Image (cartoon, rainbow, N blue to C red):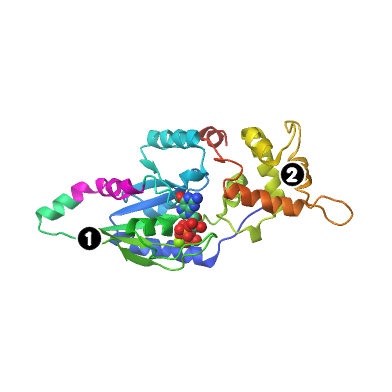
Amino acid sequence: MQNLQWYPGHMAKTRRLIEDNLKLIDVVIEILDARIPYSGRNPNFDDIIKNKPRLLVMNKSDLADGKRTKMWIDYYAKSGLRVIPISCTTLSGIGSVMNEARALVLDKIEREKEKGRNRTLKIMMVGIPNVGKSSLINRLIGKASTKTGDRPGVTRGKQWLTIKGGAELLDTPGILPPKFEDQSVAMRLAYTGAIKDEIMNTELLSYSLCEYLRDNYPDELRARYKLDEIGGLQGYEILEQIGKKRGFVISGGETDTERAANMILDELRGAKIGKITLETPDDVCEE
Ligand SMILES: Nc1nc2c(ncn2[C@@H]2O[C@H](COP(=O)(O)OP(=O)(O)OP(=O)(O)O)[C@@H](O)[C@H]2O)c(=O)[nH]1
Ligand SMILES: [Mg+2]
């Protein structure tokens, strides 16, 4: 297992940014990746955000396994957290985000109205890198107002954006915890692209991904790469077979497993293997 212990300076800075702006904020929207609804939650957010009303939004549900998405919604509901599944790509669920957020502070808004104060709602978006914070803001505003991108670390520094006649939204850069107690959490973050590939060993990453898919989505994996029985194979053997099927050969006739590793990660992220969620509430309880 790769040992991942690092904390980029800009993440420490973002933590302070979030803490410094919290007093201005009515509601925090914490965005999760529907494919890793547990590993994609920064455990430090509870400390940072404390008792601020919080709405959890499970984004990228278009890429996730619908059955598992339901399991996660139930799981969080049991701990008293409201979660709504959305997709910034298909627009599913986007229409209910503002209503859900407003519902969390209705009393406060009403009390202020009675006192004659009619101010706009202030919402802060937080989440790990690459989860779709900026995309959600653009969807809520209805046009591309803040930069998004297919890699972690696109948003730098804070940015306030306004929904016409509605609310003010604070975009923040994605942050991860300073260290991972559990390396499988780091692996899942890397599978989905929340951690930069450059600091991971993509071959090791794809071995364990192949084993996860072998145990959880064998039909999808076999169908995508036209594999025979894979039940008894190790991750590196599965990757070998995938490379062979794709004709990835290097001089001397060996299979180019590095190329195969990069491809399988790309294809997972693009949901080409299927709609895949990389953890269930049961996995997490066992850990
Ligand atoms: N398939 C799919 N892709 C999405 C969805 N939402 C966002 N994306 C893509 O995910 C990538 C990251 O989106 P951003 O909005 O830049 O993510 P962010 O959380 O602001 O990222 P940082 O600013 O880097 O922390 C982009 O390529 C988006 O197009 C979604 O619901 N479904
Ligand atoms: Mg962003």
> In the picture, which quadrant includes the C terminus?
top right
Percent coordinates x, y for residue 162 in the rendering: 29, 63
Q: Could you tell me what secondary structure mostly forms the magenta stretch?
A: helix
Q: Is residue 14 left or right of residue 82?
A: right
Query: Could you tell me if residue 245 is visible in this image?
Result: yes
Q: Is residue 106 above or below residue 160?
A: above
The Cα–Cα distance between marks 1 and 2, rounded to whole angstroms, is 53 Å
Ligand 1 is within 8 Å of the C-beta of the residue at disc 1 = no
Q: Identify residue for label 2.
A: 242
207 or 22, nearer to the observer? 207
- SS under mark 1: loop
For residue 105: magenta? yes
Q: Is residue 108 above or below residue 141?
A: above
Percent coordinates x, y for residue 267 in the rendering: 62, 49
Q: Identify residue for label 1.
A: 165
**Amino acid type assigned to the residue bearing label 2 in the image:** Ile
Residues rendered magenta in the picture: 94-108
Q: Is residue 249 left or right of residue 92?
A: right
**Amino acid type assigned to the residue bearing label 1 in the image:** Gly
Name which of mark 1 and mark 2 comes first in the sequence.
1
272 or 167, nearer to the observer? 272
